Amino acid sequence: MIKVRVHELAKLLDTNSKELIGLLAEYGYVIKNHMTVLEDDQLDVILEVFTKRYNKAVEIPDFGKQKPKAAPKKDGADAKDKEKQPEPQAEEEVPAEVVDEPIKRKVRHVDTRQTVVDVNKMDTEKLEEMVPTNVADDGVKKQKLKKGANRHRDNNMNNKAKQQQPAKEQKVKKEKKTVLIPDEISVGEFANRLGVSPTEVIKKLMALGIMAAISQTIDFDVASLIAEDMGAIVEKEIVLSDEEILFDDHEDTEEELEHRPPVVVVMGHVDHGKTSLLDAIRSTNVTDTEAGGITQHIGAHRVRIHDKKITFLDTPGHEAFTAMRARGAQVTDIAILVVAADDGVMPQTIEAINHAKAANVSIIVAINKIDKEGANPDRIKQDLTEHGLIPEDWGGDTICVEVSAKKKQNIEGLLEMVLLVAEMRDLKANPNRKAKGTVIESRLDKGRGPVATVLVQNGTLKVGDIVVAGTAIGHVRAMLDDKGKRIKKAGPSVPVEITGLSETPDGGDLFYVVTDERLGKSVVEKRKQQQKEERIKAHTAVTLDDLFDRIKEGQVKDLNIIVKADVQGSVEAVRQSLEKLSNDEVHVKVIHGGVGAIRESDVMLAFASNAIIVGFNVRPDPGAAASAERQGVDVRLYRVIYNAIEEIEAAMKGMLEPTFREEVTGHAEIRQTFKVSGVGTIAGCYVQDGTIARNTQVRLVRDGIVVHEGKLASLKRFKDDVKEVHSGYECGLGIENFNDIKEGDIVEGFKMVEVEK
């Protein structure tokens, strides 16, 4: 038996893996991916087809003298039929779609910046060009926008003519009027468009059982019924917002698309070799300085391998990755997960896996440090299977590449795998249009002003273009590539540094090239106003308190939960218990579980995924608590697993009635401990924030893990007993029935406050 993979055979036959997989599918063979080993009969079919196609024997090295067998007649006949059929079908189907177009629609574009639309000021020809051709009706000429004055004059003249004409003549000459109706329209405006009095429209509404005044609005369905009853032809009016008019977001045709380089992000645990791997890739490609040199000065770089380019983002791991996704930016195509062969899958590795899965990007595992003693790649693969990443050589679909960044082993093999995954994903973009993309990072330079590193995702960015990015707008004054050289244009998947913006945009903001600077400034001002309003408004994140109402409204289908606990066993127990709560209306899904304190990265993931954080015997660190409050992320902390299950189950059923909530009063850091005979351990503390009071409950937190919860036995300032100690002061305290106190521990004071109903 000859062992050959799909991509190896494709390389030998001078074709691509996708074509071979499609060819085998025609003969009834299901091939999972490009790494699949071909069977003898599958290999025979491919060789038979390629021999017939090129009318000569296909010579392939290392395949021996094995002759290709003839494909089965049945399959061969089917294949011939299939080869004959597509062209006539394609020729018949295209006209059919055009002929069968049932929709008769005319479109009027309205500038929504004005409450009263002045049609005289509108560039009607430009707006007509923006209307898709399929919107036009089949036998009716496209209605041009009439100027406001002419339209009103025509309506008046028609009304007068109708009054003067005899009834019989009206019947003979009567033609159906075409009326454009938006999603909502006032009764008065609707009557004006019909050319009738508002009273007639109100009478029709009353006949339908609808009581409406002249100023009230009616929807499209009601308006269309009345218009048709009055003998008019109804057509849907499409109203475009400023952003829809300004930003070019039309879909590209298949003929316009061209292949683009993949965009890759490197993630993994601390000290597993992310930076070393990027340095190894840089030194591997440094021979070709024009195309493959890497510099670290703009947060992104490009490399060349086999005349193909790859773009790497220098993001600081999964946190920045998720922060961009939280703003709606889907930047990366492939994530390289770096795992040290001598260490294994660590907490940050698991976080990176979950973040990449949530973003729905392809994962390639780079097993680093294979040159070190104690390296065990098989153990790494085993650990990965526990988190849903099954290696290809174990029958899965996750590519695992063994590398050594330090000794530069198999770096090229890793890059080839990146190109293979990119080939399978068929990444394409249209370079011949106005550019759009994503802001990677930005900074304020003393000499150049606001500087933004952007990744072009579609179109071509040129010097002099007007760019709108978030709440920033400006002309591109200068553009630098990843090697610091000035360039005049940048195509898809090219990272560049631009200057000329009015302010620094946020990382993850989308940017567009526009032609109308005045309208662009108007959009930017509206965005700034929206941001102010959003900051004022309450958050809309999912919370247990409003979960049932949102389920009833159909807003929540999946309840995403992040579980953090003190030990791994608790994580699994909580995960399994919560996922069992799923019902027909809502599916409970634990998207991430980890050990240790609740970090800011957990809050970021929860915000991006609209999730609730459940903490079991752990506490959030100060940064995470502040971030959760700022972004409206619901953090629930429990000591008993059944309380968590009961509370979430009650929320899902609409029975959640919280009566008490916990209010943290202050934190104190233990700086020294004293053992007193007959008393126990006394802690010398410094109050960091808030107040530590004698009558409040306290918990002892060690490295984010709750060690003990109880009451204070004593609280002193010097030798005096005190009721409370404020922030910035030192004190001595003892905890009832607990002496395992260590330096560096945090004493957290809290009290239970009744919730007002």
Image (cartoon, grey):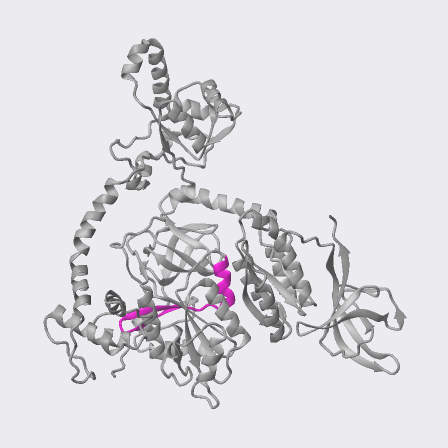
**In the rendered image of this protein, does residue 617 appear above or below residue 110?**
below
Q: Nearer the viewer, residue 25 or 322?
A: 25
Q: Please tell me in which quadrant of the rendered image residue 113 appears.
A: top left
Q: Is residue 50 left or right of residue 691?
A: left
Q: Residue at x 75, y 74 (%)?
A: 670
**In the rendered image of this protein, does residue 208 appear above or below residue 263?**
above
Whether residue 589 is visible to the viewer of this picture, yes or no, is yes
Q: Is residue 608 left or right of residue 371?
A: right
Q: Residue at x 26, y 31 (%)?
A: 140
**Position in image of residue 644 (x %, y %):** 66, 63
Dividing the image into 4 quarters, which one contains the N terminus?
Answer: bottom left
Is 308 one of the magenta-colored residues?
A: yes
**Position in image of residue 372 (x %, y %):** 46, 88
Whether residue 544 is visible to the viewer of this picture, yes or no, is no
Q: Which residue, as the protein is rendered here, is positioned at the far bottom? A: 373
Q: Residue at x 31, y 60 (%)?
A: 428
Is 367 one of the magenta-colored residues?
A: no
Q: Is residue 149 left or right of residue 649?
A: left
Q: Nearer the viewer, residue 457 or 461?
A: 457
**Position in image of residue 493 (x %, y %):** 35, 62
**Position in image of residue 445 (x %, y %):** 48, 61
Magenta stretch, residue numbers:
301-326
Q: Which residue, as the protein is rendered here, is positioned at the far left? A: 55
Q: Please tell me in which quadrant of the rendered image residue 21 appears.
A: bottom left
**In the rendered image of this protein, does residue 488 appear above or below residue 397?**
above
Q: Is residue 752 left or right of residue 66?
A: right
Total count of labels: 0
